[in-house]
């Protein structure tokens, strides 16, 4: 695969605004480990290898375990995630796939049991932000770094 274009170089003024919003969301007060999990899950759903690679690495650097990172894709079947994390992952899946069924009243009520209204807005903005990055990276074929592999 070859990168189609560099969106930072192609639209630098607009990308500065995207980066500013991303920074604001990262600094909004939500737990950074929770943000790592939702960024990874949305990126898995969207098939964004660049973002899966980046957010797995960032989470690991911030102290996340490899086992939990591997199991984000199967969080429903794993006891390793707290109820709050499980709700955030469920919210992430629903908002990422919003065209499928919207957000039900039941899910909204359940989310409010785990997050304040302000936190839920922040969480939704974080999900929207990673979906924006995923769409840029997948559309324009952003290529993740490739590590040298060991010879067999």
Image (cartoon, grey):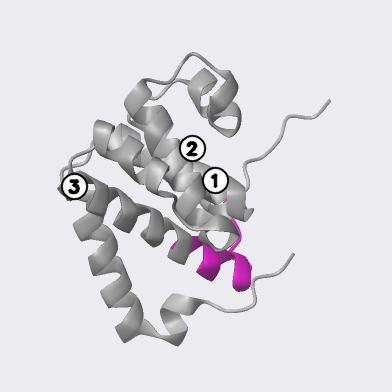
> Which numbered marker is on residue 117?
3
Give the residues in magenta.
133-145
Expressed as whole percent of the image width and height from the top left, the position of residue 150 reads: 73, 29
Label 3: which secondary element: helix
Left or right of residue 13: residue 66? right
Q: At 56% across and 54% down in the image, what residue appears? A: 50
Given residues 37 and 11, the one toward you in this image is 37
Dot placed on the residue nearer the N-terminal end, 3 or 1 = 1
Q: At 53% across and 18% down in the image, what residue appears? A: 67
Mark 1–mark 2 contact, CB under 8 Å? yes
Q: Residue most toward the front? A: 105
> Which numbered marker is on residue 56?
2
Label 1: which secondary element: helix
Vertical arrangement, residue 117 with respect to residue 115, above or below: below
Does the magenta-highlighted stretch encompass residue 134? yes
Given residues 18 and 11, the one toward you in this image is 18
């Amino acid at each position: 695969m070859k990168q189609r274009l560099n969106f930072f170089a192609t639209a630098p003024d607009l990308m500065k605004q995207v980066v500013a919003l991303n920074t604001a969301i990262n600094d909004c007060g939500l737990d950074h480990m929770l943000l790592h999990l939702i960024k990874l899950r949305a990126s898995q759903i969207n098939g964004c290898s660049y973002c899966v690679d980046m957010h797995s690495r960032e989470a690991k650097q911030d102290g996340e375990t490899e086992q939990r990172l591997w199991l984000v894709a199967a969080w429903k079947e794993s006891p390793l995630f707290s109820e709050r994390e499980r709700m955030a992952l469920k919210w992430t899946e629903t908002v990422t796939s919003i065209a499928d069924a919207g957000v039900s009243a039941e899910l909204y009520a359940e989310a409010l049991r785990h997050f304040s209204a302000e936190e839920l807005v922040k969480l939704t903005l974080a999900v929207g932000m990673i979906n924006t990055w995923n769409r840029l990276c997948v559309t324009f074929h952003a290529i993740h770094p490739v590590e040298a592999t060991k010879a067999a």
